Image (cartoon, rainbow, N blue to C red):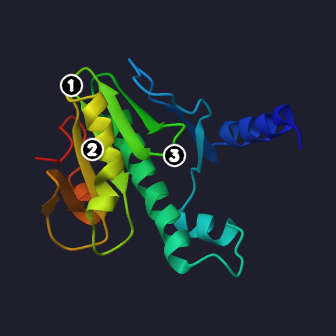
Amino acid sequence: MNRKTVDGFVNVLEDLLLGFRLGVFSKRAQRQLVQHPKFYYYVDVGVFRSFRPKGLLDSPEEIGGASMEGLVAQHLRAWIAYSKGDRALHFWRTRAGLEVDFVVYGEDTFLAIEVKRSRKVSSKDVRPLLTFLKDYPQAKACLLYGGKERLKVNGVLCLPCEEFLRGLVPDSPAPVD
């Protein structure tokens, strides 16, 4: 299928409020970044799980991880929409393959967020955030994960995803302190 046809289908999904695209955060980029936006279904995570093609090589963790990332995206969009101020939601991915799931950027917020479904985190999990922080030392960074306790890995705050989402209150800063 050619690119214009796919773009047309994605536009229809956005017009029907079934999905949305996140653009690449490229302000003062110091690395080569991908240029294509990332697409999310803007529907219940359970609906996404039933739509998603599944095969023998797809683990439940992969499917659950994408669902959790979509849930965080929806919460961040709602938080931004209901808050005063000028914030925008992006993602960041280098051509080398390092990716930060979300970058919230605005007049009072500069936050990089990585989402992992796993109940444990390792130094490998925070590597994209550390790379982002090298390029943007003014930013805060956090990793949201499926565990139950706050911890730091290589200086990066790791929060239980549920705690973070419950702390997203309109007109308040992101709960990363």
Q: Is residue 43 visible to the viewer in this orientation of the structure?
A: yes
Q: Is residue 103 above or below residue 162?
A: above
Name the foreground residue: 38 vs 168. 38
Q: Earlier in the sequence, mark 2 or mark 3?
A: 3
Determine the secondary structure under disc 3.
Answer: loop
The mark found on residue 130 in the picture is: 2
In the displayed image of the protein, which residue is found farthest to the front? 96
Tell me the residue that label 3 is attached to. 97
Name the foreground residue: 88 vs 12. 88
Hey, what amino acid is under mark 3? Gly
Name the foreground residue: 77 vs 59. 59
Residue at 16% across / 47% down in the picture?
Answer: 176
Hey, what amino acid is under mark 1? Asp
Q: Earlier in the sequence, mark 3 or mark 1?
A: 3
In the displayed image of the protein, which residue is found farthest to the bottom? 56
In the displayed image of the protein, which residue is found farthest to the right? 1
Quarter of the image for the N terminus: give it: top right
